Amino acid sequence: MTNDGIDACRSVVATAQPPGPHLAFASGLVESMVVPTFVLDSDGVVRIWNRACENLTGVPASEVVGTREHWRGFYENARPCLCDLVLHDRLDEFETYYTARASSQDHNFGVHAENWCVMPRIGRNLYLAIDVGAVFDPQGRLVAVVETLRDMTVQKQAQDSLARLASQDALTGLSNRREFDDRLAYEWHRARRERSSLSLLMLDVDFFKQYNDLHGHPAGDQCLRTIGHALRTAVSRMTDLVARYGGEEFAVILPQTELRAAGNVAERLRGAVARARVPRGEPGRGEFVTISIGAARAYPAQEGGDERALVERSDQALYQAKKAGRNRVALSQG
């Protein structure tokens, strides 16, 4: 397809003027496709914006055909779409804008991406699967790019829900042990790369076995749920992770946190559990359920090894807190 051919297609879609029969058939075919599709010419100008694309974005063809503002259908602020990266040979920027990788190493066979799009005209976010193919003339010159779209929002939401279930503790709603292990390994490597600190809190519910024996497992489960909620609401940074480590033990990952600050967080968590006022109902153990906390800090870039050393130091500090009488915070000085 030449530029003249694209112009002819534009006249069919945008103005309904009759071009030659072959181009009329081609442009009419694109226009009637149920797959949302638009076409840019070699200058990045929109030449075709079919009805399915109008329905998906809420943007009529009359607003974008003849402009370079196709991005308005998908984002609130100007940014490249995948077709722009292909057109201007900027696929080295792919990961800046898209999370899903290109489907082929040979981009002559098309490029695939997936992305959440704002969709400002329809007022809700959509997760779109995007495919872009380039059109070349007989001399090998790129004359157009074609972008097709699929709404994958329902599938993505289902996938995310399954991922959350796989990483979530069923009883407390906190991250589970698997998610904790994965996240701690990630934060360890990140701290090593950025030469920053990483702190870890290990928490244990005091005398929980006796609580379970006295009140029964349903009450014990409710106790853990209450404590999990108190911990989650007391941790304020989005970068921190609260997890159920196992049984009555919890853990909190604190990236870029020094030991003193980790101790302050630990005291805040201990206070949050105390304020939850879960009745212990056992003489000699205090009126309400309490927790003991061990805190440790590491500098992965200086220490070498892996995150297991940090877990061991936190566990040792937790042991010291329990040995000293429970319902307290102990800091590892290692």
Image (cartoon, grey):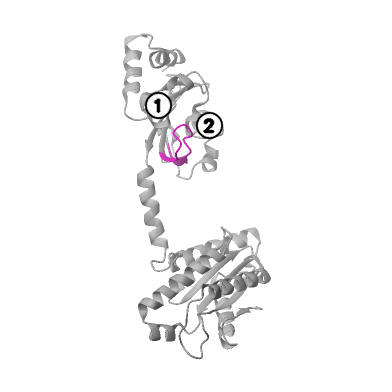
Q: Nearer the viewer, residue 197 or 262?
A: 262
116 magenta-colored: yes
Label 1 neighbour load within 10 Å: few <14, some 14-19, many 20+: some
Determine whether 143 is above or below 247 in the image.
above
Identify which residue is drawn at 44% across, 14% down. 7
Location of the N terminus by quadrant is top left
Q: Nearer the viewer, residue 222 or 81?
A: 222
Q: Nearer the viewer, residue 310 or 79?
A: 79
State the image coordinates of residue 171 (x, y, percent, origin top left).
Answer: 39, 69
In the rendered structure, which amino acid carries the disc numbered 2? Asp
Q: Is residue 54 left or right of residue 120?
A: left
Does the rendering let one see residue 141?
Answer: no
- The residue range painted magenta reads 112-128
- Tell me how far mark 2 sits from mark 1, CA to CA: 27 Å
Nearest to the eye among marks 2 and 1: give it. 1
Label disc, if present, on residue 54 of the rendered structure: 1
State the image coordinates of residue 239 (x, y, percent, origin top left).
Answer: 57, 59
119 magenta-colored: yes
Determine whether 148 is above or below 179 in the image.
above
State the image coordinates of residue 315 (x, y, percent, origin top left).
Answer: 55, 79
Q: Are marks 2 and 1 in contact (CB under 8 Å)?
A: no
In the rendered structure, which amino acid carries the disc numbered 1? Glu
Identify which residue is drawn at 39% across, 86% down. 214
Label disc, if present, on residue 121 of the rendered structure: none
Label disc, if present, on residue 89 of the rendered structure: 2
Does the rendering let one see residue 251?
Answer: yes
- The answer to which quarter of the image holds residue 172 is bottom left
Q: Is residue 25 left or right of residue 57?
A: left
